[in-house]
Image (cartoon, helix red, strand yellow):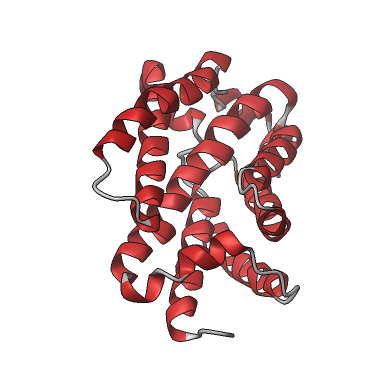
Amino acid sequence: MPSDANPLIHKAYRPVPGWSLLLFPAACAVLAPLFVWLLPDREMLTVLGAFFVIGLLAVVMAVAPLGRTAIPALGLRPAKWKYLVFGPLATLALSVAVSQLGIEPQGMKQVLDFVPNRLVLSLLLLAVLAPLVEELVFRGLIYGWVAGRWGGMAGLIVSSLAFAAAHFEPAHVVLVLPLGLLFGWMRWRTDSLLPSLVAHILNNGFAVLAAVYLPGV
């Protein structure tokens, strides 16, 4: 039963306050110039790494004033094992199905071109850090703010659209929107960030490994 329909779960729900959502872009704006200045080079993976580190620090800064309530506000709570198992499987199946559309975003291709020579770094960056930051921002901050005011279904839709739009390139938006909706559904259905986080990490890890061991497939 979705959290919207369960008053006991909803009573324990801690919505993300609006000021916290505003603190996130403000923190990004403050941190970005510092990281740009400190970058050792402008290689693709280095820039992406700085981008996601800034995002992670900005999330922490945005929710820090909430204290301990930041954890439930972001959805960092246990979930039933079946969602942690079948969620990632459904995500991989959907990802494979979407890839059959034959759409290949150029931005993604450029990033994956670096993977074979920097596998460990690519896995840490693209399959761990990137999903963590994206889930905290879209299914944590944005979902938490919208759902706290207009309900979980609104949170699902808004966070999924924002997730897709953040990928900018139209071809990439088309590819990630179905995944965003699935991740949003898991967040709504379980009232937890963990299923979508696990699914996102495994999906990205599979994509990175496929770029190395299954090129052209």
Please state the horizontal and vertical placement of residue 39, each as a whole percent of the image: 27, 43
**Foreground: 16 or 78?**
16
Give the percent coordinates (x, y) of residue 98.
71, 69
Q: Is residue 196 above or below residue 57?
A: below
Can the viewer see residue 82 in this picture? no
Where does residue 162 sit, x and y in percent of width and height? Answer: 66, 39
Q: Quadrant of residue 58?
A: top left
- Residue shown at the point (54%, 43%) measured from the top left: 192
Residue at x 47% of width, y 25% of height: 24
Q: Is residue 149 left or right of residue 132?
A: right
Which image quarter holds the C terminus?
bottom right
Q: Nearer the viewer, residue 129 or 101?
A: 101
Where's residue 75, x and y in %? 51, 37
23 displayed left or right of 42: right
| On-image quarter of the N terminus | top right
Q: Residue at x 41, y 44 (%)?
A: 52
**Would residue 81 be found to the left or right of residue 121 on screen?**
right
Identify the residue shown where x is 71% and y is 59%: 171
